[in-house]
Image (tube, grey):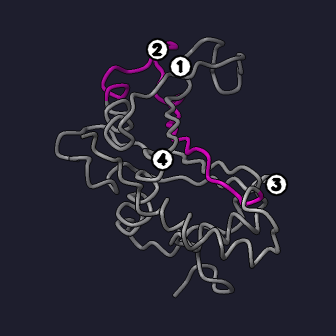
């Protein structure tokens, strides 16, 4: 007998409770109009770590190790498409490492991000509510990888931050914000600039 895959907790919450709330809140007539979290992109820029257009090996291994551990996927290297003399970047030089997570892996990553990693940020008061693009996708950054409990900092001598993009389909900033809030995403409090 084949074991049935268990639906990630937050995906089930979205399907069973948050979806119907969104339909009612925004007057949507059809479930196919609901906004959908389609993928999460995690990337780490490495431009500052280049020496003679080559990436330092220990930094490269730290970034690959971190992204592989927290997402369960090996990252791909993104190379610069154009040369920018002001930033000492040449075309073809490494510029970032990137991972795109989808489906069950995406929901599990989001659950750990919201309920495990973000509460470990020192003096955390929530993320800004202004970082949505017109299509409802949301971008923010973490300053170091130590917030992930899977990362053993005793074995790491290179710290780095990361940018995280939550990509939505069929959405706008209002719907995405409502959806993220219902999923427990920690936005800063209104009117106090995040101060408690």
Kindly check if marks 2 and 4 are in contact, taking CB atoms under 8 A apart as contact. no
Mark 4 crowdedness (10 Å alpha carbons): few <14, some 14-19, many ≥20 = many
Q: Give the mark, 3 or 2, whose residue is nearer the N terminus.
A: 2
* Image spot of residue 22 (x, y percent): 70, 72
Estimate how packed mark 3 is, as few (under 14), some (14 to 19) or many (20 or more) residues with alpha carbons within 10 Å. Answer: few
Q: Is residue 81 left or right of residue 159?
A: right
Which quadrant holds residue 86?
top right
Give the labeled residue for mark 1: 94
Q: How far is the residue under mark 2 from the one under mark 4? A: 31 Å
Q: CA distance from mark 3 to mark 2?
A: 36 Å
Q: Earlier in the sequence, mark 2 or mark 4?
A: 2
* Residue at numbered disc 2: 54
Q: CA distance from mark 3 to mark 4?
A: 22 Å
> Which mark is first along the chain, 1 or 2?
2
Residue sitting at x 34%, y 57%: 147
Q: Secondary structure under badge 3?
A: loop
In this view, the residue in front, 170 or 83, is 170
Q: Which mark is residue 106?
A: 4
On screen, residue 78 versus residue 121, left or right, reads right
Q: Which residues are magenta?
A: 33-61
* Nearest to N terminus: mark 3 or mark 4: 4
């Amino acid at each position: 007998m084949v074991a049935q895959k268990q639906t990630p907790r937050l995906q089930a919450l979205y399907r069973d409770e948050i979806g119907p709330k969104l339909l009612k809140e925004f007057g949507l007539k059809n479930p196919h109009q609901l906004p959908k979290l389609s993928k999460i992109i995690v990337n780490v820029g490495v431009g500052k770590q280049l020496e003679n257009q080559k990436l330092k090996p220990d930094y490269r291994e730290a970034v690959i190790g971190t992204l592989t551990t927290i997402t369960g996927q090996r990252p791909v290297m993104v190379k610069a498409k154009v040369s920018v003399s002001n930033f000492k970047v040449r075309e073809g030089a490494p510029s970032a490492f990137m991972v795109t997570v989808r489906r069950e892996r995406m929901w599990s990553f989001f659950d750990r991000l919201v309920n495990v990693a973000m509460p470990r940020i020192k003096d955390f008061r929530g993320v800004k509510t202004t970082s949505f693009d017109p299509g409802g996708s949301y971008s923010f950054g973490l300053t170091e990888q130590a917030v992930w409990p899977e990362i053993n900092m005793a074995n790491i001598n290179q710290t780095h931050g990361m940018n995280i993009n939550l990509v939505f389909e069929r959405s706008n900033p209002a719907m995405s914000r409502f959806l993220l809030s219902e999923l427990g995403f920690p936005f800063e409090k209104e009117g106090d600039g995040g101060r408690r």
